[in-house]
Amino acid sequence: MPHQYQDLIVLFHDTFFSKYNTQLIKGGDEPVYLPAGERCDYHQIIFAHGYYASAFHEISHWCQAGDARRLLEDFGYWYEPDGRNEQQQKQFEQVEVVPQAIEWAFNVVVRKKFHVSSDNLNGFQGNTHDFESKVLQQVQTFLSQGFPTRAAQFIEALAQFYNTPLPLTIEHFVQKEENLVCLN
């Protein structure tokens, strides 16, 4: 089955709009989360350029954000763009472990390869293997203790749409050539 971002928009709407008043929207250069307000009466998860991977990444942040964070632009998270120094990169990776673990699970369910991203091409290039290991450890924690509620709901919706049997197991996740990918 082809991977079309339009399918994600429909699946997200059908799964979450009535309860969370939140829409997934194709945007331009920069992804952003915008809470409902004077300019729009629903919350918006805006992903970059219609990229499937960007949609998954932004949804994963939304799935872990609590009630209070979902009332803040970009969930109130600190973000320093590409070009981060070593300290900034460590902070970035610390914040990214959980959403990237969720994102990886989404990719497994739809049978797409996933690569952990340190998203810092023009900055400090540390040991990415450590970050990848932390993301894999978080995946293992989710597999044993359960994914956040909204992530689990979206995994279920994706599994139904893409005819993927559940539950996910650690066998669905492997290390290959120092990049994390999902099995097809």
Image: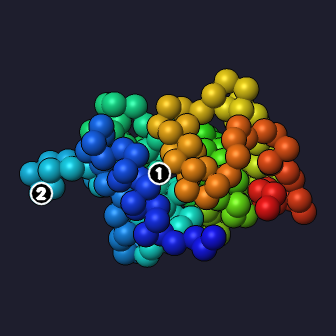
Q: Quadrant of residue 69?
A: top left
Residue at left 52%, top 48%? Answer: 157
Residue at left 68%, top 52%? Answer: 164
> Is residue 92 shown to the viewer in this render?
no
Name the residue nearer the viewer: 152 or 25: 152
Position of the C terminus, as image quadrant, is bottom right
- 135 left or right of 60? right
Residue under numbered circle 1: 59
Q: Which mark is first along the chain, 1 or 2?
A: 2
Residue 8 location in percent, x, y?
Answer: 46, 61
- 20 left or right of 159? left
Residue 60 location in percent, x, y?
Answer: 51, 47
Residue under numbered circle 2: 39
| Label 2 residue SS | loop
| Label 1 residue SS | helix
Q: From mark 2 to mark 1, how far is it between C-alphas?
A: 21 Å
Name the residue nearer the viewer: 9 or 94: 9
Q: Which of the two marks, 2 or 1, is nearer to us in this view?
A: 1
Residue 98 location in percent, x, y?
Answer: 60, 40
Label ID, residue 155: none
Label 1 crowd bin: few (<14), some (14–19), many (20+), radius 10 Å: many
- 11 left or right of 40? right
Q: Is residue 75 above or below residue 184?
A: above
Q: Amino acid at mark 2?
A: Arg
Q: Amino acid at mark 1?
A: Ile
> Is residue 53 shown to the viewer in this render?
yes
Colour mode of the rendering: rainbow
Residue at left 30%, top 37%? Answer: 19
